[in-house]
Amino acid sequence: MTGEGLAGDFDISDLVDYNDLSVMTDCWLEGTRPEGIWEQFKAALAVGDVNKALMFMAETSRDRYAEIFQIIYADLPAFVAGMGNLILDSQDEGKIKYEMQHQVGAETYLFPVIFIKDDQGAWRIYSF
């Protein structure tokens, strides 16, 4: 199939082909893609489920973010509402850096979001 916005066009080439199958199987074998982790993380925070959200974080970062989330717990829905889309910045073996868009009025700000692979090969949020 060809065209824009096709389900299954994982490499965003406007074509569903063997390359997309390769991307899909790689994600299946390697674990969930960082964008999906990010959305699940935001969804957990939006409903105040900090413990679930922390499971999407790298183990080395959990304690630090647990403290932050405890401090801003009452404001988590507003905090999450400001977390925008991710834009891929760079990728290395076991590390991916995105820029998160944050809109304030007419101004758009970008903040780094870094994912690393854990010992089981699953992507986790290291920092944002």
Image (cartoon, rainbow, N blue to C red):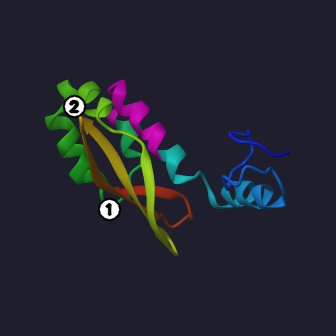
The image quarter containing residue 38 is top left
Separation of marks 2 and 1 at Cα, in angstroms: 34 Å
Above or below: residue 116 compared with residue 67: below
Q: Residues within 10 Å of mark 2 (few under 14, many from 20)?
A: few
Q: Which residue is mark 2?
A: 105
- Image quarter where the N terminus lies is top right
Q: State yes or no: residue 40 in magenta.
A: yes
Horizontal and vertical percent for residue 105? 21, 31
SS of the residue under disc 2: loop
Q: Nearer the viewer, residue 112 or 125?
A: 112
- Residue 101 numbered mark, or none: none
Residue 84 sits above or below residue 121 on the image:
above
Magenta part of the chain: 38-50
Spot occupied by residue 81 in the image (x, y as percentages of width and height): 31, 29
Does residue 128 show up? Answer: no
**Residue at image location 22% in from the left, 38% down from the top:** 69
Q: Which residue is mark 1?
A: 60
Residue 7 in the image: state x and y as whole percent.
73, 39
The residue drawn where x is 27% and y is 37% is: 103
Q: Is residue 32 left or right of residue 101?
A: right
Q: Is residue 99 toward the left or the right of residue 69 in the image?
A: right
Mark 2 or 1, closer to the camera? 2
Pointers 2 and 1 in contact (CB under 8 A)? no
